[in-house]
């Protein structure tokens, strides 16, 4: 796994309007310069916020990436919980989980936005 490069992509997108334009214009071309696994590439292209979270992406980077894709806050939080339920515990980074993440995902109630 190349968590560094996944986070580098998000950092670049968060800091540069040009990077955002290039990403939105041709995501495959934009991603060519970053060494990613197939799983990481798919998570970025879709975008799969839950999987990116489980891969270990920092929430500060991830929330801006979600905003780039016009994902509202409540849906962003739900996506992280769904990611744990679908893909298992956070695998790396500062949010790495123990106990298979079961207690975390079962104990969070995210209320829908109005």
Image: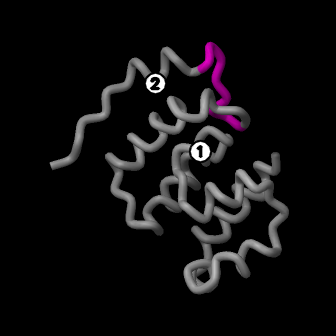
Q: Nearer the viewer, residue 17 or 76?
A: 76
Q: Residues within 10 Å of mark 1 (few under 14, many from 20)?
A: many
> Is the stretch drawn in magenta largely helix, strand or loop?
helix
**Crowd rating for badge 2 (residues with CA inside 10 Å; few <14, some 14–19, many 20+):** some
Look at 61% across and 71% down and name the residue there: 13
Residue at (69, 65) in percent of width and height = 9
Is residue 94 found inside the magenta-colored segment of the image? yes
Relative to 91, residue 42 above or below: below
The disc placed on residue 91 is none
Disc 2 to disc 1, how far (Cα)? 14 Å
Q: What residue do we see at 61% from left, 29% from top? A: 88
Q: Is residue 63 above or below residue 10?
A: above
Q: Secondary structure at mark 1?
A: helix
Report whether 97 appears left or right of 36.
Answer: left
Give how far across and how far down residue 1 sits, in percent.
Answer: 82, 46
Front position in the image: 45 or 71: 45
The image quarter containing residue 100 is top right
Kindly identify which numbered label has been placed on residue 51: 1
Circle count: 2
Tell me whether the residue at label 2 lies in contact with that at label 1, contact meaning CB atoms closer than 8 angstroms.
no
Start and end of the magenta stretch? 93-100
Residue at image mark 2: 105
On the picture, is 104 further left or further right than 4? Answer: left
The answer to if 101 sits in the magenta stretch is: no
Please state the horizontal and vertical placement of residue 44, each as a whole percent of the image. 62, 60
Colour treatment of the image: one colour
Position of 104 with respect to 70 (left or right) is: right
Q: Is residue 89 above or below residue 98?
A: below
Secondary structure of residue under mark 2? helix
Q: Earlier in the sequence, mark 2 or mark 1?
A: 1
């Amino acid at each position: 796994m190349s968590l560094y490069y996944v986070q580098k992509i998000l950092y670049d997108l968060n800091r540069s309007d040009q990077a955002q334009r290039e990403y939105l214009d041709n995501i495959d071309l934009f991603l060519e310069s970053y060494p990613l696994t197939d799983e990481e590439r798919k998570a970025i292209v879709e975008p799969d916020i839950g999987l990116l979270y489980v891969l270990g992406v920092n929430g500060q980077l991830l929330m801006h990436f979600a905003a780039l894709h016009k994902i509202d806050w409540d849906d962003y939080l739900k996506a992280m919980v769904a990611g744990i339920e679908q893909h298992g515990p956070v695998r790396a980074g500062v949010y790495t989980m123990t106990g298979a993440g079961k207690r975390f995902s079962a104990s969070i109630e995210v209320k829908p936005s109005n």
